[in-house]
Amino acid sequence: MTTPDLPPETNTNAPADPAAPESNDSSAALSAQPDASMQEYYKLQSHLLLTTLVMAAVIFISVWAVYSLNIALNYLIGACTGVVYLRMLARNVEQLGREKGRIGNTRLVLLVGLILIASRWNQLQIMPIFLGFLTYKAAVIFYMLRTSILPSQG
């Protein structure tokens, strides 16, 4: 039974045209889903990067004050390498669903190369460089603790 006073596009009993495109509501909902999740991913990515940089700056100044500029610069080299590693990891995770089925391990070449250079060059010290590299992991742990203790703020 059709309703004569409604226009044909809003008539709920009218047969659907098979050549017509899908409803705008359902296609918009499907396309909005990945966009919202990617926006959330980009927000997480920028938050982790910012937290890593702030932690690296605070630790660099602290190490400089407590130890020496040489050790602080070694830490900073490791922290900068950790930031580059985090960016490469974020890029690989972003491409995971689109292009390839797994994440490569080429990022580890950064750390291995840096440790090899530090072991050969007398001015560089391995321990501050390695601890600087791990600063990004401290930022991830900080984010995880913050979101689990104080959920849904923002």
Image (cartoon, rainbow, N blue to C red):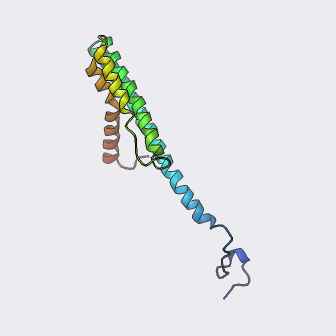
Percent of width and height locating residue 92: 44, 41
Write the residue at 46% across / 50% down: 97
43 in relation to 60, above or below: below
127 in relation to 32, above or below: above
In the rendered structure, the answer to whether residue 54 lies left or right of residue 21 reads left
Percent of width and height locating residue 109: 37, 29
Percent of width and height locating residue 29: 55, 61
User: How many numbered circles does the render carry?
Assistant: 0
Q: Return the residue found at the far bottom.
A: 1
72 in relation to 135, above or below: above
User: Based on the displayed image, in which of its 4 quarters is residue 73 positioned?
Assistant: top left
Residue placed most toward the observer, 35 or 17: 17
Residue placed most toward the observer, 137 or 62: 137
117 in relation to 51, above or below: above
Percent of width and height locating residue 9: 70, 74
Determine if residue 55 is in view: no
Residue placed most toward the observer, 119 or 61: 119
